[in-house]
């Protein structure tokens, strides 16, 4: 019985180490995505992992049209700006001519 209990503890420890390793790998991937697109202007991220999701949720909770928030960001950061949501980067353009710049 004692040998089985120690075996279960090793499996649990291994599972915890694997989960922490996967989380750190995901954080490294998110950081890589941030560095890859940081040259494109955009609003500061609310959270490292969530990106702009809290801002979008806040705009949606106030029954505000999210596209109004996008237009506000376009006025502040230019006709091309980026939005981070989790590990995804979305690039928005409000002008067809600005596509030629990038």
Image (cartoon, rainbow, N blue to C red):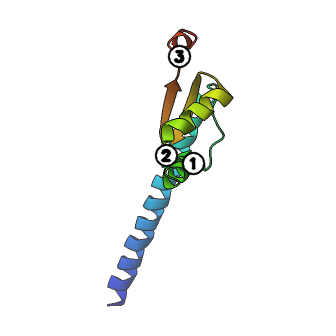
The span from disc 2 to disc 3 (Cα, nearest Å) is: 26 Å
Q: At which x and y percent is residue 34? A: 58, 36
Circles 2, 3 touching at the beta carbon (< 8 Å): no
> Residue 29: x and y, percent?
51, 41
On the picture, is 74 further left or further right than 85? right
User: Which is nearer the eye, 82 or 6?
Assistant: 82
Image-based side of 46 in relation to 20, left or right: right
User: Which residue bears the numbered disc 3?
Assistant: 95
Number of numbered discs overlaid on the protein picture:
3
Residue located at (49% from left, 60% from top): 20
The correct choice, above or below, for 90 with respect to 28 in the image is: above
Upstream in the sequence, badge 2 or badge 3? 2
Residue 24 drawn at (x, y percent): 53, 52
Precedes in sequence: disc 1 or disc 3:
1
**Residue under numbered circle 2:** 86
The reply to whether residue 35 is visible in this rendering is no
Instruction: State the separation of the CA atoms marked 2 and 1.
Output: 13 Å
Alpha carbons under labels 1 and 3: distance apart: 23 Å
Label ID, residue 55 = 1
């Amino acid at each position: 019985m004692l040998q089985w209990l120690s075996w279960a503890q090793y499996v649990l420890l291994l599972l915890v180490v694997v989960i922490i390793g996967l989380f750190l790998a995901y954080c490294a991937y998110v950081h890589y995505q941030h560095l890859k697109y940081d040259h494109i202007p955009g609003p500061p991220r609310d959270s490292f992992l969530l990106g702009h999701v809290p801002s979008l949720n806040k705009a949606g909770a106030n029954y505000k049209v999210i596209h109004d928030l996008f237009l506000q960001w376009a006025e502040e950061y230019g006709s091309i700006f980026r939005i981070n949501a989790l590990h995804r980067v979305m690039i928005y353009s409000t002008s067809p001519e600005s596509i030629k710049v990038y």
